[in-house]
Amino acid sequence: MKESLRGQPEQTSQLDDRELSKLRRSSVTARNVEHDDGSGTFTMRMSTSGEESITQELDPVQEEGSWKVCFSS
């Protein structure tokens, strides 16, 4: 398994041509962005041509000067 620049295992996946094509036609927008002192909230909307949009409220945190979001299931 390859390692990322931070020394963590790099996760890879194989996407078929159909899945790659869908990703290329996708758009992601962030709205209702609010933040203060290292935490915040925003609404993410992902749209893919021919499919229903996904909207999700997310809670980013600031770590070492960078904003990060956990997308775990």
Image (cartoon, rainbow, N blue to C red):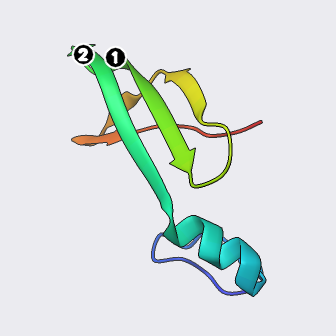
- Of residue 18 and residue 57, the one placed in the foreground of this image is 18
Q: Residues within 10 Å of mark 2 (few under 14, many from 20)?
A: few
Residue 19 falls in image quadrant: bottom right
- Residue 8 rendering spot, x and y as whole percentages: 61, 68
Q: Secondary structure at mark 1?
A: strand
Relative vertical location of residue 51 with respect to residue 2 in this rendering, above or below: above
The image's mark for residue 18 is none
Alpha carbon distance from label 2 to label 1:
4 Å
The image's mark for residue 35 is 2
Residue shown at 39% from the left, 28% from the top: 61
Q: Amino acid at mark 2?
A: His
- Residue 56 rendering spot, x and y as whole percentages: 57, 24
- Residue 54 rendering spot, x and y as whole percentages: 61, 33
- Residue 18 rendering spot, x and y as whole percentages: 74, 78
Q: Earlier in the sequence, mark 2 or mark 1?
A: 2
Whether residue 64 is visible to the viewer of this picture, yes or no, is yes
Tag 2 and tag 1, C-beta contact below 8 Å: yes
Q: Amino acid at mark 1?
A: Gly
- Of residue 55 and residue 52, the one placed in the foreground of this image is 52
Residue shown at 64% from the left, 77% from the top: 20
Residue 72 falls in image quadrant: top right
Q: Spot the residue most to the front.
A: 50
- Of residue 32 and residue 49, the one placed in the foreground of this image is 49
- Residue wearing tag 1: 40
In this picture, residue 64 sits left or right of residue 50? left
Residue shown at 25% from the left, 14% from the top: 34
